[in-house]
Amino acid sequence: MVQHERQSILQNMRWLAGANLVVKPLWFLFLLMSTRMLGPEEFGKFMYALSYVAVLGYLFEGGVDMFTMRELAHDPTRFNVLFGQTTLLKVISNGLLIVATGVSLLLLGLPPERCLLIMLATVHMLFQSATIHFRFIFRALEVMKYEARSVMLEKVAVVTLCGGAILISSRAEAFMTAFVAAYVITSISTLRTVWKQVGFPHWSFDPSALWNNVLRPAMPFALMGIFLIVYYRSATLFLQWITGSDTLVGFYNAGYRLVEAFALLPTIVVMPLYATFARSQQDKSTVIHILPQAARVLLAVSVVVSLPMLLFDQEFTLLLFGAEFLQASSTIGLVVLTMVPVGMTWLFGNLAGAVKRQGKLNWFIVAITCGNLLCNWVLIRQHGVMGAAVTTLFTELAMSFSAAWVVRDYVDLREFGKVLAGVFIPAAVVLVIGKMHLLPGAFVVQLSLTLIFLAASFFAFGVVRIGDVRRLISIQSRRPANEQDGDP
């Protein structure tokens, strides 16, 4: 294993934040412009293909990525053997995905153009899966500067290749082909970084060892992944199956694309904390102190971003996506509100996995997923795309509360109560005033007043303090006394 220096939470967060600050504005503009230029129908086709393959992909993923990160965070000396075993399992699962996709397309008898899109999405899934696996190694070993570089390469490659493709053709097939090429480049480059900076894995094929050392202990993560991806993608699949409308799929995913863009913030905040979570048996007090600080950042930002989009849904939809999406403005506004519970689910869900309570959380995930499928089936049939939006919001709320319940002994109720009250009381006031049309002036004036009120209220309630973010990012990983700063 190549020698490397473990980075502190401060350094890891700076690298992830820095990488996203560099590419995030360009990436956000790309998401908006590509959705607008594809239009609701072609964008709907693109997202349906990705959702179809994502569900199949997680059936064979086996929970390998999360398991690898947790185990290496606990014991980095297992890298040589564990990385070889998990990478081999990735190759096997990707082969099974190709077979499963091909067989399912034959059985369903989908049109040729739909099959082409789905097969292209399958190739994308193969290389995206490899890239994610390599990045989990960086997270586990706390050297996220390499993940940051991989993220920057990914975004630049997607923007460059897909941007060029959409200028030539606004068809989903051309866009998906460029999407695949971008992830091929990213995965190869990320693998090269792993070999160069961390080390080459030890390869061995021992079915018994693969099962006992990886697959069986990773089963809780595998079940979590399957059920999570089902409820993440079920709205897209149900919309297509029930309504047969690619346009409605595009309407729903326009809002969800904003939520996925926002998910970069929880990644920046939570991922550098994962190794600290995993070591919480030795230092539980640090985790109890970190959680309210992280929650302040996630809740404050998510409310400031999502609440104005809910209040001024028509103005934001026209501005971001264009007139073709205007009739879906209320749906987009509601879906965007999902940003609030998404951040909390990331925070508490990752803590549950790190402290080996994924099995307990899975019982909640199974129940919530079943409820999600039932609600999507009923509400989409009755209310179309708005039914999908309502289901998504309440599903994510249920997930965040469930994850918090599983790790409740890590939660300082008094501190969290202050944070929640300080965020949601001002948000409720703004929502009531906005819906009663009591804000004066034009859209720009109303938006400015809303943001000023939220910011002032957050400072007044102590949700946002000048030193909060500084304290969060300056927390160093506490190590056992016998642990050195060099090679873990």
Image: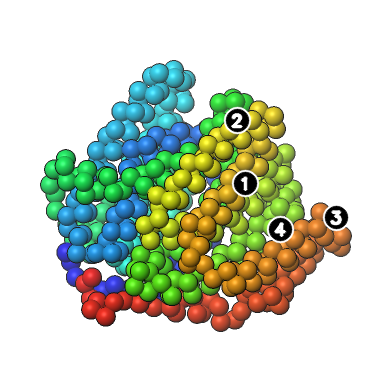
Which structural element holds mark 4? helix
Q: Which of the two labelled residues, at mark 3 and mark 4, occupies the earlier sequence position?
A: 4
Give the mark toward the camera: 3 or 2: 2
Distance of mark 1 from mark 4, alpha carbons?
Answer: 19 Å
Q: Considering the numbered disc 2 on the image, is that residue within a helix, a strand or a loop? A: helix
Can residue 231 be spotted in the picture?
A: no
Q: Nearer the viewer, mark 3 or mark 4?
A: 3
- Say which residue label 3 marks: 436
Residue position marked by numbered label 2 in the rendering:
377
Query: Horizontally, is 211 left or right of 297 in the view?
Result: left
Location of residue 333 in the rendering, given as x and y in whole percent from the top left corner? 68, 49
Q: What residue type is labelled 4?
A: Pro
Image quadrant where one finds the N terminus: bottom left
**Mark 1, other Cα within 10 Å: few <14 / some 14–19 / many ≥20:** some
For mark 4, what is the residue? 308
Residue shown at 69%/75% (left/top)?
A: 461
Q: Are marks 2 and 1 in contact (CB under 8 Å)?
A: no
Q: Disc number at residue 394?
A: 1
**Label 3's element?**
loop
* Amino acid bearing label 1: Phe
Q: Marks 1 and 3, how far apart in space?
A: 24 Å
